[in-house]
Amino acid sequence: MKTYETLLVDEPHPGVLLVTLNRPEFSNAFNTQTGRDLFDVFHPLELEHRKYRCVVITGAGQKAFCAGGDLKERNTLTEEQWVLQHELFERTFRHVLNCPLPVLAAVNGAAFGGGLELMLQCDFAFASRTARFALTEVSLGIMPGGGGTQTLARAVGERRAKELILTATPFSAEEALAWGVVNRLFEPDEVLDKTLEAAQRIASNAPISVRQAKHSIHYGLQMDLTSGMLFELEAYQRMVQTEDRQEGVRAFNEKRKPVFKGR
């Protein structure tokens, strides 16, 4: 397993890739190296997605998932360096969003700014009851630039997203759950284990089926209903001739657990 300066990368269960933002002394804030490291992890997954079946992102410690961009580092950047750094972050976030594998977030603490945007790029998230969330960029003379104006609005609706972003107001884990920002809440020491349990369930399912279902949901929701239904049928047809489809039916009839191979 490759080592990184700002990340811990591990395979705690077969087929499950665990990526931990590892700058706890800086509340796991993004610096330029974090962008490079995350890019290096996620970029290959767009093409080489057979080794793993699910990805989990979390932060080191219990204080923060990710506090966003490292403003102390940014204070030292020239305007040109700021633009180049942000382009790196943009590309990294796109690779997370476009990852064909399911990507889950285990939100162990505060998710502010780019940290919340990273979480919103994931397919779903479990969070600590003590987690806090915010997109406060407008209070710093900028605005969300990691997809937050788009992903938060899709999660909570246009009017609430405008309220949260324009007022730069933090919100609680309970509010995040009620508004659909996160899927479930757990005690702080349970969040990662519960997220890994969900990742294991995903990893035990047919990998082609999982990827096609994710693909269909994500892109189908950007279409009208009729087009989305047709898109789903195209995704479905991809599985008809797979070995996994045959294995799934056989295992059901033989009353045993299927062994899926991604073929």
Image (cartoon, helix red, strand yellow):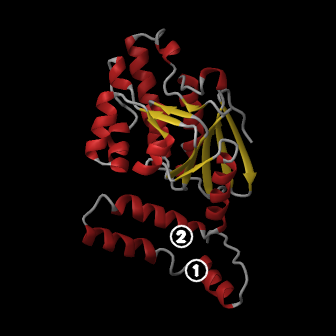
151 shown above or below 227: above
Q: In this view, does 259 lie to the left or right of 32?
A: right
- Report, in whole angstroms, how far the alpha carbon at label 2 lies from the one at label 1: 9 Å
- Image disc number at residue 133: none
- Density class for disc 2 (Cα within 10 Å; few <14, some 14-19, many ≥20) is some
Q: Which of marks 2 and 1 is nearer the N terminus?
A: 2
Circle 2: residue type? Ser
Q: Residue at x 51, y 76 (%)?
A: 239
Q: Where is residue 161 in the image (x, y as percent from the top left)?
A: 31, 40
The reply to whether dot 2 and dot 1 touch (C-beta < 8 Å) is: yes
Quadrant for the C terminus in the image: bottom right
Which label belongs to residue 245? 1
Quadrant, the N terminus: top right
The mark total stands at 2
The answer to which of 3 and 131 lies nearer the viewer is: 131
- Image point (47%, 74%), residue name: 238
Residue 156, position in %: x, y?
Answer: 35, 48
Residue 256 percent across, percent down from the top left: 73, 83
User: At numbered mark 1, what does the secondary structure look like: helix, strand or loop?
Assistant: helix
Mark number for residue 209?
2
Q: Tell me which corner region of the image, top left, top right, bottom left or bottom right, holds residue 162.
A: top left
User: Residue 258 in the image: x percent, y percent?
Assistant: 69, 78
Answer whether residue 73 is visible to the viewer in this image.
yes
Q: Tell me if mark 1 has few (under 14), some (14-19) or many (20+) residues whose alpha carbon lies within 10 angstroms of its own.
A: some
Image position of 168 (left or right of 131): left
- At x 43% / y 50%, what residue is drawn? 178
Amino acid at circle 1:
Arg
- Residue 180 makes an appearance in the image: no
